[in-house]
Image: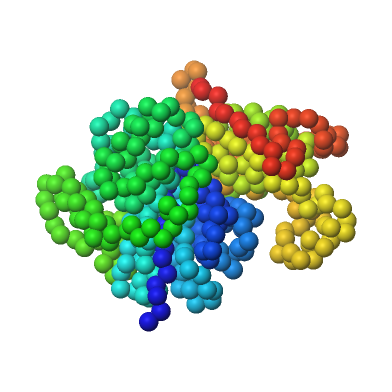
């Protein structure tokens, strides 16, 4: 019988450092032959593109991507199909599954442990949760043991902090990432809180998710019995809150419909994609980043700023936005090099006027409306009601105001010194101004 392939499941909040960890593992895999499946919220799988750029793997050849949904419910069938196809089409000795920042890791692990064609090929090695330690301390600091909502009837009002707790409770390894943003006392408190939630967990303090792969891969820490026990305790707690107890098996087989709602609904998270073939004005876009509303918990993607010929990658989590110069746009390469690149990449999106230059950003937040088409009412200084656009629509309008005008575009301001990086590998960090 063919040996099963170990699986590592990466979980963690939006912007905690999961993709950074994944790239670190790929670049330091040693003799391991890794395959990757990436689930990203939104129709554009930014994380899959970043991993492909930072490794020798290509999408569809070692990297499988599932977008615009979550692995723990609506993409379960797609996940099963993708991992079976990977095992059938490519030889590798370890699979890493990076779930989206709003996915619950337990149902993902359950797929690999039930009597299915997936379980016949794979075996869970560990669940690794990456924590933004600064966010964790700010959210739960001072609590003896953080608690989460267990009443299914209240699921529609569950905060994202509940998901953060669940991601810790089922973890075998927790990376207390962004340790450089915390004091030693805060790191000790974070570790104590994590161990209070999950006494058997292995904790590792990291900066930029730089952990020893030997501590994360091939560790054989996952215990399905513990997962069963945790889910059983959750059912008992929920029943106690409701004043009654009724036994219900959670996700035995592939039925995952009872008492479970899509995380978008449960945690109030939504997303949209912004695209433009016109560059941003440097100062106006910098001001935009400094005034992002708190309800935008994550944004990421590719940015075109008029004053640099560098392609910029945005990674924003909470109040911090980091822009990294990944290299020149293909359109700015010498003719021969540009044409050779294009001939080798026929799938490259190309515009006759601006080439590959574009902005493509995914925004993830907690107060978006349905597609930005609905309007809310507010009260002006005179006490009169007025209609105001929803958050998505307002963000789109603000981004449009950041674009260069025709007159500014004609000024050809490329090369003008700004706070944005203009050399490959350069970075700029913007912090949201406190209101």
Q: Nearer the viewer, residue 275 or 355?
A: 355
Whether residue 44 is visible to the viewer of this picture, yes or no, is no
Quadrant containing the N terminus is bottom left
Residue 27 vs residue 67, the one in the foreground: 27
Q: Residue furthest left?
A: 244
How many tags in the picture?
0
Horizontal side of 404 relative to 3 (left or right) equals right
Q: Is residue 189 above or below residue 236?
A: above
Pick the residue in front: 77 or 265.
77
The structure residue drawn at horizontal position 34% and vertical position 74%, both measured from the top left corner, is 116
| Residue at x 48%, y 47% (from the top left corner) | 211
> Which residue corresponds to the image point at 53% horizontal and 58% vertical from the top-left?
29
Q: Position of residue 374 (x, y in %)?
A: 50, 42
Is 417 drawn above or below residue 317 in the view shown?
Answer: above
Residue that extends furthest to the right in the rendered view of this protein: 335
| Residue 350 seen in this snapshot | yes
Residue 38: percent from the left, percent from the top?
51, 58
Position of residue 371 in the picture relative to residue 121 (left or right): right
Colouring rule applied to residues? rainbow
User: Residue placed farthest to the top in the image?
Assistant: 382
Image coordinates of residue 312 in percent, x first then y, are: 68, 43
Q: Nearer the viewer, residue 226 or 244?
A: 226
Rendered residue at 54%/63% (across/down): 31
Q: Is residue 74 above or below residue 409?
A: below
317, above or below 56, in the image: above
Position of residue 159 measured from the top left corner of the image (x, y, whole percent): 35, 40
């Amino acid at each position: 019988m063919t040996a099963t392939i170990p699986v590592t499941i990466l979980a963690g909040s939006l912007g905690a450092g999961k993709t950074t960890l994944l790239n670190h593992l790929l670049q330091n895999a040693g003799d391991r032959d890794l395959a990757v499946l990436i689930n990203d919220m939104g129709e554009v799988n930014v994380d899959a593109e970043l991993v492909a750029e930072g490794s020798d793997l290509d999408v569809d050849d070692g990297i499988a991507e599932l977008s615009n949904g979550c692995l723990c419910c609506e993409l379960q069938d797609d996940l099963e199909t993708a991992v079976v196809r990977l095992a059938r089409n490519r030889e590798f000795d370890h699979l890493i599954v990076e779930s989206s920042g709003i996915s619950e890791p337990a149902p993902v692990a359950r797929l690999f442990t039930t009597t299915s064609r997936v379980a016949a090929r794979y075996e869970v090695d560990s669940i690794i949760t990456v924590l933004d330690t600064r966010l964790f301390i700010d959210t739960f600091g001072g609590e003896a043991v953080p608690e989460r909502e267990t009443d299914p009837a209240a699921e529609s009002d569950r905060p994202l902090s509940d998901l953060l707790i669940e991601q810790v409770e089922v973890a075998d390894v927790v990376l207390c990432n962004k340790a450089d943003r915390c004091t030693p006392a805060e790191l000790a408190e974070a570790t104590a809180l994590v161990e209070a939630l999950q006494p058997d967990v292995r904790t590792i303090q990291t900066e930029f998710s730089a952990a020893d792969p030997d501590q994360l891969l091939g560790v054989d820490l996952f215990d399905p019995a513990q997962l069963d026990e945790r889910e059983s305790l959750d059912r008992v707690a929920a029943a106690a809150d409701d004043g009654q107890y009724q036994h219900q098996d959670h996700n035995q087989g592939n039925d995952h419909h009872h008492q479970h709602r899509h995380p978008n609904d449960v945690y109030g998270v939504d997303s949209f994609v912004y695209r433009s073939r016109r560059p941003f004005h440097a100062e106006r876009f910098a001001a935009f980043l400094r005034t992002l509303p708190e309800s935008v918990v994550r944004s990421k993607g590719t940015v075109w700023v008029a004053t640099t010929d560098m392609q910029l990658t945005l990674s924003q989590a909470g109040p911090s936005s980091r822009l990294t110069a990944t290299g020149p746009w293909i359109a700015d390469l010498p003719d021969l090099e540009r044409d050779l690149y294009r001939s080798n990449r026929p799938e490259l999106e190309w515009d006759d006027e601006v080439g590959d230059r574009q902005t493509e950003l995914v925004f993830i937040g907690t107060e978006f409306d349905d597609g930005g088409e609905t309007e809310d009412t507010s009260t002006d200084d005179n006490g009169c009601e007025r209609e105001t656009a929803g958050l998505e629509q307002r963000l789109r309008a603000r981004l449009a105001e950041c674009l260069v005008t025709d007159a500014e575009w004609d000024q050809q301001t490329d090369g003008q010194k700004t706070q944005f990086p203009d050399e490959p590998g350069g970075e700029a960090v913007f912090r949201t101004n406190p209101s």
